[in-house]
Amino acid sequence: MVVDQASKAAVRGALAPGERLPLVGDVLSIVLHPNTRGLSWWVPDLPAWGPFLLTLLFWVVLVGVLPVYHFHALRTGGSGWAAVAAISLAGGVGGHVADGLFAPWTTDWIQLLELPAGNLADVYSWVGLAALAVELGRTERKRRGMGLAGRWALARETRRDFIRFLRDLMRR
């Protein structure tokens, strides 16, 4: 998150909006794109309450990612993929939450090919989602052959254990 915000500040200080600095020909460029929507290019226009809901979701992820990771690591032994997912998602969401503190817009500055520009928080988020997908695949392989009734029982047991874990965590 700190590196994300520092990189955005450096780009805002070095480039004018729309100015492009090619790094690798037409493949990778630094371009200052003030994103006043505050949302990624692929998110459709939202109603007026949409940004509030998205901010609330960001805070839920930011506050919840570490306890969920800790519970997962205790329950399954975790893996490097789970750690990468937790750290990257926390950094990405934290970078997005912090955007409003340092500038009146989200500073998008990394442009690959002709795709819309993004920033390090976007990169962290995509890396985190990819690592989460790998971790889910890893844990799903352990459940292969388990029927619907077994999966349902496991889900109920996991929910009970997670609630117990959260209660113990709050008591500490």
Image: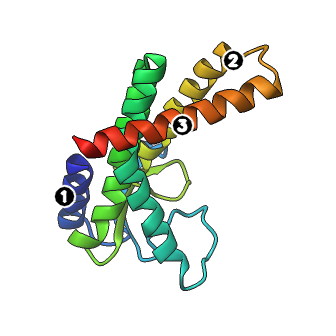
At label 3, the amino acid type is Arg
Q: CA distance from mark 1 to mark 3?
A: 47 Å
* Whether residue 137 can be seen here: yes
Q: Which residue is mark 3?
A: 160
Image coordinates for residue 46, horizontal then vertical, percent: 60, 77
Q: Quick one: SS at disc 1?
A: helix
Circle 1/circle 3 CB separation < 8 Å? no
Image coordinates for residue 40, horizontal then vertical, percent: 51, 62
Q: Nearer the viewer, residue 158 or 84?
A: 158
Q: Which residue is mark 1?
A: 10
Q: Residue at x 36, y 68 (%)?
A: 106
Mark 3 surroundings: few (<14), some (14-19) or many (≥20) residues within 10 A: few
Q: Quick one: SS at disc 2?
A: loop
On the image, which quarter does residue 141 sit in?
top right
At label 1, the amino acid type is Ala
State which tag comes first along the sequence, 1 or 3: 1
Q: Decide if residue 19 is on the left or right side of residue 47.
A: left
Q: Which residue is mark 2?
A: 143
Mark 1 surroundings: few (<14), some (14-19) or many (≥20) residues within 10 A: few
